Amino acid sequence: MPKVKRITKWQDLLPAAREMLKKDAPNMYEGMEIKKGQKVLILNDRTADQLVVEAVSAALLEKGAQLTVITLEGNRGLKDPGELLDGQFSNNWYPPWVWEAAKEVDFVLLQAFVKPPHTPLPDLPNKPVIDNWELTADLMVAEHQKYPVEIRDAIDELTWSKLFNCTQVRWTDLEGTDITMKLTLDDWRRATEKKRKRTGKPFQPGHLMLPAPVADMNGLWVTSSVTFGGPIPRTKFHVENGRVVKVVGGGKYGDRLRKSFVEHKDLHSKAICPGPGINWITTIGICTNPHARQSPFFAELEGSARIVAWTFGHRRAGVMHTSVGEGYVSPTHKLIRHMDTFFNTVVTEKDTVIENGHLTALDDPKIRKIAKKYGDPDVLLKELWIPAVSGINAP
């Protein structure tokens, strides 16, 4: 972890907040263009980083936005990874009256943590832009936010060329993951057609994905990190034909998964899973920004800020971001569990994509040439943060 300054005054964040409100940010960056007179609702809670809320509020008022801030109590004291994941991440836990207020605005900024792509939100008649900025004070001024998009996009393109339409994948990790995948052109078509329609690209910038779920995926997946929760005891997932058939270890988190897999074995997803149950592998993502990191203040945080402080690390180049399940257990709650592996090696018949957690595109001469436009390639293409994983590089 690089040396990170502790921010104690919201005024120190104001320059960053002003920049973030100038234009819509690329994927995996924070920002949205707000103009004078537009109505903005910040949904806050007391466990979110209040310095971020204060700075963004001040910048919005400077721009002449009409601002409303609603502050909920939030989940004070909540630190358990499984409860954070299932209770906040993909669960619309807000009181209904909050969404009545959202019907009156142009933008809704979610600082009380939920993740819109995975959380069932109401269909509001005014169609506001809804976003969550995954920021603590130190992350708001971190190197990631300033990282040149041109370099990140070039890393994406080169990495994608090593993945797209490959037919064989071998994925291992120093924690014990050993997965093989056989992919078809139809797997790739299904995985990319929606993204092409939405953005014109076959991938999501900064967050490339292998097809999932797929029938021919087998082996062992091992993790000790819940993306939107925090560290867990090492958990082993035995995968057969694209679904988890056995969970070993994991402590309380493993118990939570085993119980839910049985409880919801007959649950059908709305679209993605080929059969019933919430034990299908549904996401296999590879992130690409070498200057992303976690917040070193994670351990002292709770609720919304705790989730943000940990999850930001999955944006780092070479991190694999994998989910299991996708099932609606209520109209406001979708069960989907994302977990990270940090020291991956991924090899296709085309090339080595990641080697022991290092994205190989970072070493490519073409990428170095682009990076040189912005500074020293050795600095810009080096990972700023190396995760500490128990039994691998930490006690």
Image: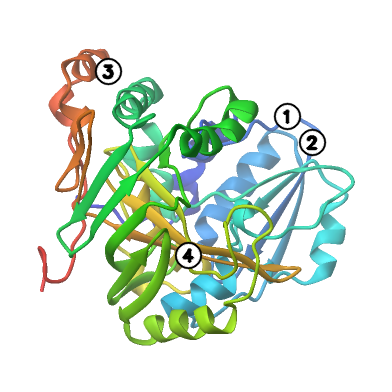
For the C terminus, the quadrant is: bottom left
Label 3 amino acid? Tyr
Kind of residue at disc 2? Gln
Q: What secondary structure is marked by label 4?
A: helix
Secondary-structure class at tag 1: loop
What is the quadrant of residue 368 in the picture?
A: top left
Asked if labels 2 and 1 touch by Cβ distance under 8 angstroms, the answer is yes
Q: Are marks 4 and 1 in contact (CB under 8 Å)?
A: no
Residue 158 shows in the view: yes
The residue tagged 1 is 35
Residue to which mark 3 is pinned? 374
Number of the label disc, if any, that sits on residue 217: none
Residue 94: x percent and y percent? 72, 69
Q: Amino acid at mark 4?
A: Ala
Q: Residues within 10 Å of mark 3 (few under 14, many from 20)?
A: few
Residue 13 screen position, x and y as percent: 47, 45
At 58% from the left and 22% from the top, the residue drawn is 200
State the residue position of label 4: 305
Mark 1 or mark 3, which is nearer the start of the sequence? Answer: 1
Q: Earlier in the sequence, mark 3 or mark 2?
A: 2
Image x and y of residue 196, in percent: 58, 27
